[in-house]
Amino acid sequence: MPLTTAAMPLQFDAATITRLSTSGPRYTSYPTADRFNPDFGYGSYLEAVAGQKMRGGGRGPLSLYVHIPFCDTVCYYCGCNKIVTKDRSKAATYLSYLKQEIGMQGKLFSGMNQLAQLHFGGGTPTYLSDRQMEELMAHLRENFAFAPDEEGEYSIEIDPRTVSRDRVHSLRAQGFNRVSLGVQDFDPDVQKAVNRIQPEAETLAVMQAARDAGFRSISIDLIYGLPKQTLDTMRQTMAKVIAAGPDRIALYNYAHLPHLFKPQRRILDADLPPANVKLDMLALCIRELTAAGYVYIGMDHFAKPDDDLAVAQRQGRLHRNFQGYSTHAEADLVAVGVSAIGSVGSTYSQNEKTLDAYYEKLDQGSLPVARGIKLNTDDLLRRLVIQKLMCNFELSIASIELAYPLRFADYFAAELEQLRALEQEGLVSIDSEWLSVTLKGRLVVRNICMVFDRYLGMPRAQDQGAANVQPLRYSKTI
Ligand code: SF4
């Protein structure tokens, strides 16, 4: 099986996509976050870190995720866990607790606190002032040993509306070397309909500033399916994005779930493009991006062929974690901040989701872990299978049989049976050595991964006997 299949173009098959368009996980973790349970708390987290220390220092250098939950104004499409406020004093309080948590994590990981990857997400990380960010980065450096700039990946999500050219240079000087810019759409009517007025010139100026400041990679987030979007506006936005030439593009499907996300109630149903137009928009974007030389990485992500993600994918080194795709396979992920999710050893853990609960646990002197999960052998095996399919679109059956004492065909007999139906539709190919996602199957890769998800449809332990169980917050595959 050639390693380069991942770089080939996609095959867009509207009928297959429409038929398989069902709610499904994005597999930034397996098991998915709705399976985390409150029995996993601070004590379980300490055990996980101690286990990594006993093994001689975890899985190589660490990844660190820092969550800044604040936003100045609300974007109506938003489904994130954020706090919309103009009261800046809230950020100052938050920072004092965040620093306390960073100090505790730094102590816990002492002796294995080498850092190769850092990501600031939100909310809006640039809600913090330049001074606050500088102090926070200095505090992080006191507690973690950063790899040199040319080796480490230090990224930050920037809302172009919140930064000046000087601020972008300042972020580079503070140690960030990758940026991801929230754009969503350049069309003024669409921006108005989602309450995110962001002039095109402003975004392009921030991109230029990032290039001038020496950022290694610039990524842009776009959304299709927003109110007032048409095939025409999408075509124009795409042309402008391609002309701007970011290294990576994330193209998300807008999932309209107003019963779950309050801001979305401000979006009029009548303004939303119908499903067939959304599909045409997706087809258009894929066509334009691949014609412009971008490689489909998988699950909404495109990159230039010489970008690290595309190179890692060609070499079979791509990994998937809570920030999407990553080149740092198998690193332990330490996550700080309200609602942040980390992954240490064979565990996942999530911090408290409200500021009050987050502050209360830190006031008590414990890390604010609210829930989590310790993976069993079956979880680890299925996680590996799903990771390989999501990242490489292929799975070496021999490599699984080498890592685990099992016969793939026996252990996954039921799953292989289900996959036969997908094989007949030309979405996967299966032989005794490889399970491969075809070019036609790539856009529905999560449907293929869902076959290996043991938990789908299974009630959660914490819901047993409970009334009013919330529906799972999965978005549609397309
Ligand atoms: S989309 Fe981003 S900037 Fe807008 S409200 Fe949500 S988290 Fe804040």
Image: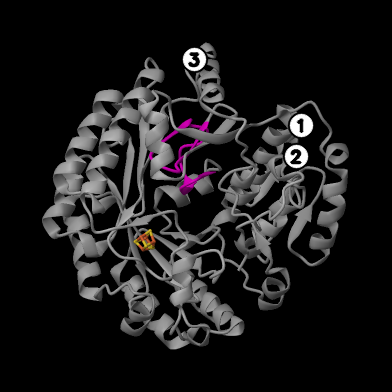
Horizontal relation, residue 443 to residue 307: left or right: right
Q: Which amino acid does label 3 sit on?
A: Lys
Q: Choose top left, top right, bottom left or bottom right for residue 210.
A: bottom left
**In the image, which is nearer the foreground, mark 1 or mark 3?**
3
- SS under mark 1: helix
**In the image, which is nearer the foreground, mark 2 or mark 3?**
3
Horizontal relation, residue 305 to residue 245: left or right: right
Name which of mark 2 and mark 3 comes first in the sequence: 3
- Residue furthest toward the front? 467
Residue receiving disc 3? 53
**Residue, x 45% and y 49% (percent of image)?**
309
Residue receiving disc 2? 397
> How far is the residue under mark 1 from the one under mark 3?
28 Å
Q: Nearer the viewer, residue 122 or 171?
A: 122
Query: Is ligand 1 within 8 Å of the beta carbon of the residue shown at mark 1?
Result: no
* Callout 1 touching callout 2 (CB < 8 Å): yes
Q: Which of 98 and 284 is in front in this view?
A: 98
Name which of mark 1 and mark 3 comes first in the sequence: 3
Residue 357 location in percent, x, y?
Answer: 43, 39
Q: Decide: is 170 above or below 301.
A: above
Question: Label 3: how many residues lie within 10 Å, few (<14), some (14-19) or many (20+)?
Answer: some
Is residue 109 in sight in this rendering? no
Question: Label 2: how many residues lie within 10 Å, few (<14), some (14-19) or many (20+)?
Answer: some
Horizontal relation, residue 264 to residue 74: left or right: right
What span is colored magenta in the figure?
319-343
- SS under mark 3: helix
Residue receiving disc 1? 401
Q: Which amino acid does label 1 sit on?
A: Glu
Question: Quarter holding the C terminus?
Answer: bottom right
* Callout 1 touching callout 3 (CB < 8 Å): no
Residue 467 location in percent, x, y?
Answer: 72, 52
Residue 272 location in percent, x, y?
Answer: 51, 82
